[in-house]
Image (cartoon, grey):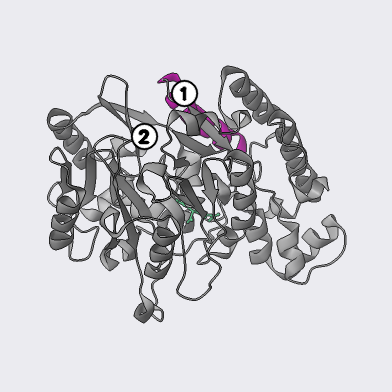
Amino acid sequence: MNFDGLIGPTHNYSGLSDGNIASLKNSRKPSNPKKAALQGLEKMKILFDLGFPQGVFLPHERPHLGYLRSKGFKGDDKTIVSSAAKESRLLLNQAYSASSMWAANAATFSPSMDSNDCFAHITPANLISMNHRSIEAEFTYKQMNIIFDESNFKVHKVINEKEYFGDEGAANHLRISKTHLEKGLQIFVYGNEKSQKNSNQIVRQSKAASEMVANLHQLDKENFMLLKQSMKAISMGSFHNDIVSLATENVFIYHQDAFENSHEEIKKLKSKSGLSNLYLLEITNKEIPLEILIKSYLLNSQLVTKKDGDMVLIMPSEVNDYKECTNWLYKIKDQTPIKDLRYVDIKQSMMNGGGPACLRFKIVVNENEFNSINKNFLLNKKLIMQLENLIKDSYRESIEINDLEDPYLINESFEVLDKLTQIFKTGSIYSFQK
Ligand code: SUG
């Protein structure tokens, strides 16, 4: 099942992510938080209507006044925001980012059947390579503990070593297995090693963090492997690996230029997986040039198995603009269990570099584990209606970058969050509620 990050009321385009083409290209354009949140909800509904349980993560508290206070701003809420607006727009923009919507970066998840202690493991990501994202870690840890019961889930502290330990969560983690609930092979994709620290390129996931997460999650050496993302893919805009590869159960799709030393590594992966029925689909440059794959976000899609065994691929509607992609889809429909192709309009998130797969945190749980998940965070018809009404009534239709100075936006955002805590029955969880 998946948990999607509910898109928060301060969604905006501040151009905060170097190396993320869409974020830089759309910097300072007006955003539409209402549309964004409804688009995100619509995507959750597709999975819900297909019969999958669907979870929701609450948006984080923004503006993050604690962050601004830690940078030296003092006074009441409005004074803090107005002085940040005067003295450091960058800090204000970071404090207002709704980036927690991209739940694939919230944490890394390992299912209980892969772990030596038979617990499901969750390690929230430290996201240290981007300031506006690093401030997500604390609330992610808190929220994970509210949702996932300690009887079945171990929620670890974020990796807090700083240098060389950047961790971006499930966006750089894949798992292949015969079926979801059978023991699988976990693949940790990293971008940098110590020696690359001084390169100009922003490389977000470190090998050291991937190794540490695998260790914390009690995985045997035979059940995980480390794979290096290619510098070519990163420098062309694949700032996370989930833009150039994708896996669900026995299907693994990747671009020929996704990994360093691809040929040998994929051979290793195949033999380590032990799967005779593995669909290993390599996209060649001839079929889809890397640049087009990255622009289209074709592989930043959700691949899910329906009850009848067929798979559904839920893609961003942008994929339709590229003939190379639609030709390739036509071909795989013939050769793989992927039979149902769907497109979803999540343009508001896409304009910040977040596709369908970025917006969700995928977990694999057995029935007993599922039953111990906090039910208030699971989508049902009533919750869909409540969320739709709240978004329609209280979210703005436009936020321009200068609107982040607007003192009214602070309370507007906090009021939405306060209502959400009532809907999700969490009690006071945000600091403005204390
Ligand atoms: O971290 N964009 C996010 C997009 C995350 C996509 N996630 C995955 N690939 N799984 C990021 O770069 C842009 C914010 C701004 O510019 O306002 C941003 O943070």
Mark 2 to mark 1 CA distance (whole Å): 19 Å
Please tell me how crowded label 1 is: few (under 14), some (14-19), or many (20+) other residues with Cα within 10 Å.
Answer: some
- Circle 2 crowding by C-alpha within 10 Å: few under 14, some 14–19, many from 20: some
Looking at the picture, how far across and down is residue 26, in whole percent?
Answer: 49, 52
Residue at 46% over, 70% down: 165
Instruction: Say whether mark 1 is within 8 Å of ligand 1.
Output: no
Residue 352 visible in the snapshot: no
Give the label on residue 421, or none.
none
- Specify whether residue 110 is in view: yes
Camera-nearest residue between 213 and 417 = 213
Q: Closer to the N terminus: mark 2 or mark 1?
A: 1
The three-letter amino acid code for the residue at tag 1 is Phe
Q: Nearer the viewer, mark 2 or mark 1?
A: 1
Q: Which mark, by number, is residue 317?
A: 2
Secondary element at image label 1: helix
Image coordinates of residue 354 in percent, x first then y, are 45, 47
Q: Looking at this view, is 254 or 267 the one in front?
A: 267
What's the residue type where badge 2 is placed?
Answer: Ser
Q: Say above or below: 234 vs 49.
A: below
Percent position (x, y) of residue 206? 40, 68
Range drawn in magenta: 32-50
Tell me the residue that label 1 is attached to.
Answer: 48
